[in-house]
Image (cartoon, helix red, strand yellow):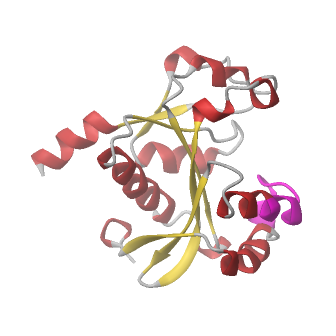
Amino acid sequence: MKADRLDIVFHPVTANDLPTLAEWIGQPHWQQWWGEPKAEVGMIRDMVEGRDTTRPFLFHIDGEPRGYIQYWHIGDHQTPKYADDNPWLSELAPETIGIDLSIADANQLSKGIGSAVLRRFAQQLAEEGYRKIIIDPDRDNARAIRAYSKAGFTPVPALEGRSGEVVIMQFDANETDKADKAA
């Protein structure tokens, strides 16, 4: 499977997807970075039911669900509830969008899928008008940092060493536009 030629489609999460997500979140490669499955699914349910502005999606490759991706609005998280534990949130423009991504099956890790999915998702967000897009992998998640770099994300120099346990990486939609025009 050549990652740059994948047929990737994003479907908004529905209540029917929650059992699948609970199963995925319970897997060891998710548990390394996610919280308790019931609580995490509860937060995704809040998104699906409109109590949270985060937008959750399953990504499908060649028609099969292969993972989860979401985007969230930084401005909605620049409150004491979130910013007290993550002061870097206050240093970003409120119109910035954050992305989170997880691959369903551990056997699909390190195959270029995450990079391809993330790049496509970020490009779609850029096409929708979002110009400031970040991702915040755990500093110890070297695999994710490599994948996000391949997807076109680079560390935000102004936040290096000041973002606690995460690395703030930004997608350069302008560079993507230039690369697409050159291709």
Left or right: residue 2 compared with residue 92: left
Magenta span of residues: 28-42
Quadrant in which residue 36 is drawn: bottom right
Q: Position of residue 81 (x, y in %)?
A: 81, 30
Left or right: residue 151 compared with residue 13: left
- For image coordinates 52% across by 46% down, the residue present is 146
- For image coordinates 59% across by 30% down, the residue present is 75
Q: Quadrant of the N terminus?
A: bottom left
Left or right: residue 71 compared with residue 181: right
Q: Position of residue 52 (x, y in %)?
A: 69, 50
Mark count: 0
Q: Position of residue 132 (x, y in %)?
A: 43, 32
Q: Residue furthest front?
A: 50
**Is residue 115 or residue 23 the one in the foreground?**
23
Q: Residue furthest left?
A: 182
Task: Work out whether 154 lies above or below 48.
Answer: above
Task: Work out whether 65 lies above or below 162.
Answer: below
Q: Residue 3 colored magenta? A: no
Task: Work out whether 61 lies above or below 37.
Answer: below
Dominant SS type (magenta): helix
Q: Position of residue 66 (x, y in %)?
A: 56, 75
Q: Residue 33 colored magenta? A: yes
- For image coordinates 62% across by 48% down, the residue present is 53
- For image coordinates 44% across by 85% down, the residue present is 63
Quadrant in which residue 55 is drawn: bottom right
